[in-house]
Image (cartoon, helix red, strand yellow):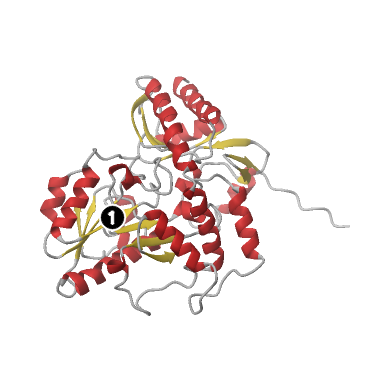
Amino acid sequence: MTAPARTRTSAELIEAEEPVLAYNYHPLPVVVARAGGTWVEDVEGRRYLDMLAGYSALNFGHRHPALIEAAHRQLDRLTLTSRAFHNDRLAEFAERLASLTGQDMVLPMNTGAEAVESGIKVARKWAYEVKGVPADRATIVVAADNFHGRTTTIVSFSTDETARSGFGPFTPGFRIVPYNDLAALEAAVDETTAAVLIEPVQGEAGVIVPDDGYLTGVRELTRRAGCLFLADEIQSGLGRTGRTLAVEHEDVVPDVVLLGKALGGGIVPVSAVVGRREVLGVLRPGEHGSTFGGNPLSAAVGTAVVGLLETGEFQRRAAELGAVLREGLAELAGRGVVGFRSHGLWAGVDVDPAIGTGREISERLMREGVLVKDTHGSTIRLAPPLTVTEDELRSALASLEKVLAA
């Protein structure tokens, strides 16, 4: 009888990755093997409270029962047709997602970067066909310190040299202005402007929350200038900030909203471009596509995600527990925390550099059984699943206090 294969340790698995995996990430030295709700477990059986939630891809926690059930049910029926044919799950997904976001049409894709790339293409097509911008002259205005993905076009308008350096030549047609600066934005917009593309909250930059009135100003400016407002809600959307979309805090309705991450429920990659009919309606068959975009499995899971959000429960939890998070961080101000920004269950925490870098703080929290991730310098981000309990949240804050004091 053959003996069962020995389970490799975390150290062995990490070492095994080195020669075969491209070094595009620098993960913390923890090897997750199982997960449920807000907790994950490594191969040795150690448990950790997940305070990152896959950069908001796990807004509903790991393996939410309603989402797992939807996936299992669909796996037994149909997983992929490509868009060469219709499938029986796509119409409901599109109808309910459009209704949830207050838009007319849905363009289903897979990843967040695909949603951004699709939004750029749609905005340019709209500029030529509707606005009348001369061919190949359309421009898109973006904000400095943005993060919209890492494809070659997207890094063309990034100001992060780590993402840009060595990947040129870059795609033209973008103008970069400071974030949260309406005067600079207005100066950059002209008759060639197809769209203004911004994150309502800049996540990768350190959860940068703009001033009250900024999003309203962007909406008014783009309307006056006759260009589109594209809101990248891939990280900020679907309950994270206490509303379905972050723009709702100012009652703003963009022309196009880009969604991803949480839309797949932590099970499959699902993204979408949702927008007004007169914008998305410029696409014609053959001009854009995706073999997997809108596949039956993704549509089934995405519909279940929309169903969870339709109850309003997760938006309320993010708002209520966001107040607990904000109060807890305020108590740490001056005790290792030199600044923080929060919006719902999402915070960027600036730690005194004398205590450690963001990476070092993340590693120390990992040893305390709490998983977070650094952004830049000595900043860490906190973005637990929206299913986190108040006790779990306070426990994580207590661990942060312990690490800072040590």
Q: Where is mark 1, residue-wise? A: 254
Residue type (three-letter) at the residue carrying disc 1: Pro
Judge by depth and name the residue closer to the eye, 364 or 110: 110
The answer to whether residue 217 is left or right of residue 43 is: left
Q: Is residue 351 above or below residue 101?
A: above
Residue 166 percent location from the top left of the image: 32, 59
In the displayed structure, 128 sits above or below 391; it is below
Q: Residue at x 19, y 61 (%)?
A: 227
Side (left or right) of 127 relative to 323: left
Label 1 neighbour load within 10 Å: few <14, some 14-19, many 20+ = many
Q: Residue at x 46, y 32 (%)?
A: 321
Looking at the image, can residue 24 be seen?
A: no
Give SS at disc 1.
loop
Instruction: Residue lying at the far right in this picture: please name it.
Output: 1
Residue 376: where, in percent of width, then height?
35, 40
Question: On the rendered image, what quadrant is the N terminus found in?
Answer: bottom right
| Residue nearest the viewer, comparing 406 with 182 | 182
